[in-house]
Amino acid sequence: MRWLIDNFSVVVDLTKTHLYLALVPLLLGLVIAVPVGTAIRGASVLRKVTSTVAGIAFTIPSLALFVTIPSVVGLQILDPLNVVIALTIYSTALLIRAVPESLDSVPADVVDSATAMGFTRLHRALTVELPLAIPVLAASVRVVAVTNISLVSVGSLIGIGGLGTLFTRGYQRDYPDQILAGIISIVVLALVFDLALFLLGRALTPWTRQKKEEA
């Protein structure tokens, strides 16, 4: 704990890098998964195939993916983009299944009412289904965010920065305090990030709070 206090500025710098490596893949995963997940929702065969492929992608060990990506896309082994690409694959794999499931949670009578009012499929998805699916989707986004924060630490094994660097340096120096500082920092970052996403989800869905107050 003493090391964490004495080297707080170092930890802050590593936290910024860690947050970048975790947040960018999450955003990219959402950009890919939301339109694709919305499009395959009504196609049962395509949805099963996509879920299977996503499941296989998520089972690939992260370290193996970090090491393989440079040779596939032509990057240097120490390029942070390796971690960004790998975690984008994981984020997309999780979210591409979560998006259709969250859309399934929208009441059928609401969807039918929007259709009866003349909403096109795209208009209905953007203005009715996706907004109402946010509470369920937000829970999955929080899981992906915390997962990314954990997986970024593995990147330190191939020399890419982040709070995981405290693990490797502490192990090399046989300095448990530095390792402990890394554990505490990652746990705190995950909790803060999760809380921020929770509050964002509440802000985007004010009607859920109104229902609880009425109940």
Image: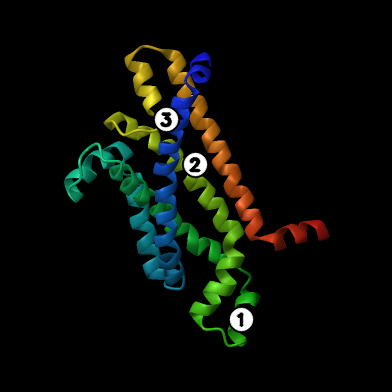
Amino acid tagged 2: Val
Check disc 1 and report the residue beneath it. Answer: 114
Instruction: Find numbered disc 2 in the image and state the secondary structure of the residue it sits on.
Output: helix
Q: Going by the image, does 85 lie left or right of 202?
A: left
Q: Going by the image, does 12 lie left or right of 76?
A: right
Instruction: Find numbered disc 1 in the image and state the secondary structure of the residue it sits on.
Output: helix
Q: What residue is at 44 percent from the left and 36 percent from the top?
A: 150
Give residue 88's mark.
none
Instruction: Say if residue 215 shows up in the picture.
Output: no
- Mark 1 or mark 3: name the one nearer the start of the chain: 1
Q: Which tag is nearer the camera, tag 2 or tag 3?
A: 3
Front residue of 190/60: it is 190
Q: Among all residues in the image, which is located at the extreme right?
A: 214
Q: Among all residues in the image, which is located at the extreme top?
A: 174
Q: Are marks 2 and 3 in contact (CB under 8 Å)?
A: no
Instruction: Say if residue 138 shows up in the picture.
Output: yes
Check disc 3 and report the residue beneath it. Answer: 163
Q: What residue is at 42 percent from the left and 30 percent from the top?
A: 163
Give residue 146's mark.
2
- Say if 193 sits above or below 180 in the image: below
Front residue of 112/137: it is 137
- Say if 41 sits above or below 124 in the image: above
Amino acid tagged 1: Ala
- Residue 22's spot in the image, x, y percent? 42, 43
Classed neighbour count for the residue bearing mark 2: other residues with Cα under 10 Å, few (<14), some (14–19), many (≥20) = many
- Residue 198's spot in the image, x, y percent? 61, 48
Q: What residue is at 29 percent from the left and 45 percent from the top?
A: 81
